[in-house]
């Protein structure tokens, strides 16, 4: 269970963050939530899809990281095996909370929380969060920026996916994947751009998508699909090294 | 022929309408009347009506039905309003709550203050001032605090009919299983004398209630009461309904998502979710519709998608001679604002109030028919409003709806609102001013001005007023438990202490 605390420079004056991108260090997730502004940077290295967020009844953008619920093929022995990092990974172990326990996202002041149960939490190793006299470290400054982007990204992401689903441009994907060793798996719960419907859009709809900057996003999503092959290759190599 | 005593009441049809009629009549008249209900196991019910509006609580009051008992019997959930997606423009979302925004009452409706606020840079959304909309967004529901939410229910229609049947039978309604094959009229007055079942049995009565669904076996096939078609305004003629497993705690509201040639509903119950697509078959074929629906539901489907066809319009004489039509036999408006069950209830109550003492008085019948006509027409206008006020260009369907000719009554309402944000409700109108306001504004119709009385407040006072209203809404919302916790509490699974989320 996560233990979220409001970050402050007294309670957490000695807090250090010791990030290790490896299995068992808090990053064993099959998917990472991503946001529209990241699409350009991420499409060259990750297969990008939508996933249903049933709590909020929305489609979220996600980067697929593995083929099992706790598999993340981008974890190395401490390093992240790609050039760009999704914001939702980079932010960890920090997160946004809302002061005054607002009833809805968007009301109340966003404030930084920290998950004290995250494996990267330390008092000995890693990077300091606060400077010895209480000022913000470079790490914390960057976190402020990352969390700000994520905060803004929620609304942008919802508006984007809602518009696409209104145009029937999001369809469920049922993909069967076969690995080099013959093993098979099916990917459920992912959604992709419905290319048939995209081709049939009339000029007005295209114009609307264009004006909102959504066409660009759509092309990024489509452009990311070959990365699924690359991800399968990562899995093949893992399977091979396991069998050796 | 005079109707002596009006003692024997025969209800034909055992869908939602039939059992609502049986329950209300037997509860009201007790053993003073002989009430029977004929239903045919062979002919199924429509049974997809699962979302309601707040007035249904009055119906339950009449029946003496306890809320907890009711909810547990029908797997019910609470409903604070309807969320509309994509109606004005793609990507838009607004909420039509079951209660007025703001917590205070003022000389001019709250939206005038809000509009002025917008003009001086206060940018809080209109729905943030609504208790119901804010609760819905937070997924909360409860009865803490002074300002109780306005609400209705979602329920399993099959279980609801069962519950009403159990009550009716306990109040001595006789149920006859059988298919009506013939309706016998008296020669002199043309009133219904009896109906004949397939078995040969004759069931005679003094008054007949036609709850046979779209076919209108008595009111139309026997009495030819006439039909007014509204499909040039409301084009939908088909629906597909499918139930799915719940994958998240039930939301305390209905969702209505506009699609390329129709719209989709989502009605969360305790144990499952009801989904459906209402569409116009001129614009999308059944296979496409089916794919569209199945692509847009969460969770495994529990049933095969069920196809329904309908015609939008109204029976010209809902009460004709000694026959009253209730439910689908009396007319149909698509379920966009969940009004059908309400119309059954209202006609029923109105009828009980005018129940003939000895013989049928034509003046009363005319009055009844006039009243229900007005009520039907106002709801029709309100539903057309949702389709008409749109800025969508993504499909010819939406463009045509925007460009169609409107009923005069509706055109007038829209004009009034456009100029200075005024809305007036007439006597027979179900939906209050605030409902028109949220839908018109939610779909992108912004009035040119606001009521001058608002200028009596200084900008600073107006800001303070808006902020206080908003804060009191927030406060109230935080007092309430999560919707599913409240439901569990009603089921007796959890004590109140653990309710505060
Ligand atoms: C797609 C759709 C969605 C809807 N959603 C909602 C909603 O969310 N909220 C809402 O309030 N309403 C909704 N409605 C309307 C609602 O479903 C109906 O108002 C309600 O079900 C009442 O139906 P009924 O009892 O009039 O007819 P039916 O359910 O059709 O029942 C007809 C009855 O008559 C009997 N019968 C017929 N012929 C004979 C015969 N010859 N002999 C003996 N018995 C006979 C049948 O056996 C059956 O019992 C919806 C309707 C549709 C089509």
Image (cartoon, rainbow, N blue to C red):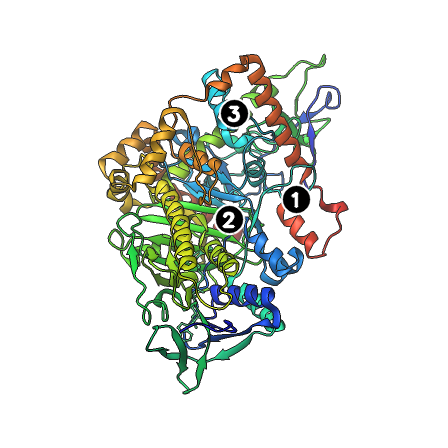
Residue B84, image quadrant? top left
| Residue placed under numbered mark 2 in the picture | A241
Which numbered dot is residue A149? none
Nearer-N-terminus badge (1/3):
3
Q: Is residue B495 left or right of residue B253?
A: right
Crowd class of label 3 (few under 14; some 14 to 19; many from 20; radius 10 Å): some
Q: Is residue B433 visible?
A: yes
Please name the residue shown 61% across and 69% down the image: B30
Label 2: which secondary element: helix
Q: Is mark 1 within 8 Å of ligand 1?
A: no
Depth check: give the residue in front, B272 or B20: B20
Label 3: which secondary element: loop
Q: Is residue B167 visible?
A: no
| Residue placed under numbered mark 1 in the picture | B142
Q: Nearer the viewer, mark 2 or mark 3?
A: 3
Determine whether label 2 and label 3 are within 8 Å by CB: no
Crowd class of label 2 (few under 14; some 14 to 19; many from 20; radius 10 Å): few
Label 1: which secondary element: loop
Where is residue A81 drawn, in percent x and y?
49, 35
Q: Is residue B382 above or below residue A206?
A: below
Of all residues shown, which one is farthest toward the bottom?
B200
Q: CA distance from mark 2 to mark 1?
A: 56 Å
Where is residue B375 drawn, in percent x and y?
42, 49
Please name the residue shown 51% across and 23% down the image: B113
Instruction: Say which chain tag 2 marks.
Output: A
Instruction: Say which chain tag 3 marks.
Output: B
Q: CA distance from mark 1 to mark 3?
A: 24 Å
Crowd class of label 1 (few under 14; some 14 to 19; many from 20; radius 10 Å): many
| Residue placed under numbered mark 3 in the picture | B124
Instruction: Say which chain tag 1 marks.
Output: B
Determine whether label 2 and label 1 are within 8 Å by CB: no
């Amino acid at each position: 269970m996560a233990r979220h605390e409001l970050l402050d420079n007294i309670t957490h004056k000695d807090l250090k963050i010791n990030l290790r991108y490896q299995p068992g260090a808090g990053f064993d997730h099959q998917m990472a939530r991503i946001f529209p502004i990241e699409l350009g940077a991420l499409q060259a290295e990750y297969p990008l899809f939508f996933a249903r967020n049933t709590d909020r009844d929305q489609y979220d953008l996600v980067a697929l990281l593995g083929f099992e619920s706790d598999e993340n093929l981008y974890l190395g022995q401490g390093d992240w095996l790609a050039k760009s990092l999704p914001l939702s990974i980079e932010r960890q172990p920090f997160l946004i909370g809302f002061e005054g326990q607002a009833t809805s996202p968007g009301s109340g002041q966003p404030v930084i929380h920290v998950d004290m149960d995250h494996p990267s939490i330390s008092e000995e190793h890693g990077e300091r969060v606060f400077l010895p006299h209480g000022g913000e470290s470079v790490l914390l400054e960057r976190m402020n920026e990352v969390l700000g982007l994520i905060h803004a990204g929620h609304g942008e992401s919802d508006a984007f996916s809602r518009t696409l689903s209104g145009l029937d441009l999001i369809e469920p994907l049922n993909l069967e994947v076969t690995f080099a060793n013959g093993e098979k798996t099916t990917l459920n719960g992912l959604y992709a751009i419905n290319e048939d419907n995209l081709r049939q859009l009339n000029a007005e709809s295209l114009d609307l998508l264009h004006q909102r900057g959504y066409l660009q996003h759509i092309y990024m999503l489509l452009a990311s699909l070959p990365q699924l092959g690359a991800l399968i290759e990562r899995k093949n190599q893992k399977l091979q090294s396991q069998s050796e | 022929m005079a109707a002596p005593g009006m003692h024997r009441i025969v209800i034909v049809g055992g869908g939602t309408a039939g059992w609502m009629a049986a329950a209300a009549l037997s509860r009201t008249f007790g053993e003073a009347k002989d009430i029977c209900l004929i239903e045919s196991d062979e002919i199924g019910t429509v049974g997809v009506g699962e979302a309601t509006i707040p007035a249904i609580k009055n119906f339950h009051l009449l029946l003496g039905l306890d809320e907890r008992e009711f909810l547990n019997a029908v797997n019910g959930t609470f409903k604070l309003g309807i969320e509309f997606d994509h109606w004005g423009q793609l990507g838009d979302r607004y909420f039509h709550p079951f209660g007025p925004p703001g917590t205070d009452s003022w000389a001019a409706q709250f939206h005038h203050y809000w509009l002025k606020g917008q003009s001086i840079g206060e940018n809080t959304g209109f729905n943030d001032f609504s208790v119901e909309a804010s609760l819905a967004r937070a997924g909360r529901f409860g009865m803490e605090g002074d300002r109780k939410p306005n609400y209705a229910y979602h329920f399993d229609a099959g279980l609801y009919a069962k519950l009403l049947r159990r009550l009716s039978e306990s109040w001595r309604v006789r149920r006859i299983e059988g298919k009506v094959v013939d309706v016998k009229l008296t020669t002199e007055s043309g009133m219904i004398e009896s109906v004949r079942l397939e078995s040969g049995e004759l069931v005679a009565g003094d008054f007949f209630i036609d709850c046979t669904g779209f076919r209108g076996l008595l009111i139309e096939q026997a009495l030819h009461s006439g039909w007014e078609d509204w499909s040039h305004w409301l084009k939908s003629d088909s629906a597909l309904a499918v139930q799915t497993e719940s994958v998240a705690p039930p939301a305390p509201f209905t969702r209505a998502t506009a699609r390329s040639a129709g719209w989709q509903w989502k009605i969360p119950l305790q144990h499952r979710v009801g989904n459906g697509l209402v569409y116009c078959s001129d614009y999308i074929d059944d296979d496409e519709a089916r794919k569209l629906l199945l692509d847009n539901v969460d969770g495994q489907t529990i049933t095969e998608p069920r196809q329904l066809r309908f015609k939008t319009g109204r029976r010209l004489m809902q009460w004709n001679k000694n026959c009253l039509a209730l439910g689908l036999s009396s007319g149909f408006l698509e379920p966009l604002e969940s009004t059908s069950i309400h119309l059954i209830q209202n006609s029923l109550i109105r009828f009980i109030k005018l129940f003939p003492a000895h013989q049928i008085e034509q003046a009363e019948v005319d009055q009844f028919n006039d009243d229900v006509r007005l009520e039907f027409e106002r709801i029709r206008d309100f539903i057309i409003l949702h389709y008409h006020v749109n800025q969508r260009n993504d499909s010819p369907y939406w463009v045509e709806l925007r460009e169609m000719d409107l009923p005069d009554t509706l055109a007038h309402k829209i004009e009034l609102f456009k100029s200075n944000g005024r809305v007036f409700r007439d006597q027979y109108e179900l939906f209050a001013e605030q409902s028109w306001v949220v839908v018109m504004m939610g779909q992108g119709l912004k009035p040119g001005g606001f009521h001058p009385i608002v200028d009596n407040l200084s900008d600073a006072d107006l800001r303070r007023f808006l902020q206080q209203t908003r804060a009191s809404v927030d406060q109230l919302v935080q007092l309430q438990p999560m919707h599913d916790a409240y439901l569990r509490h009603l089921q007796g699974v959890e004590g109140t202490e653990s309710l505060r989320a």
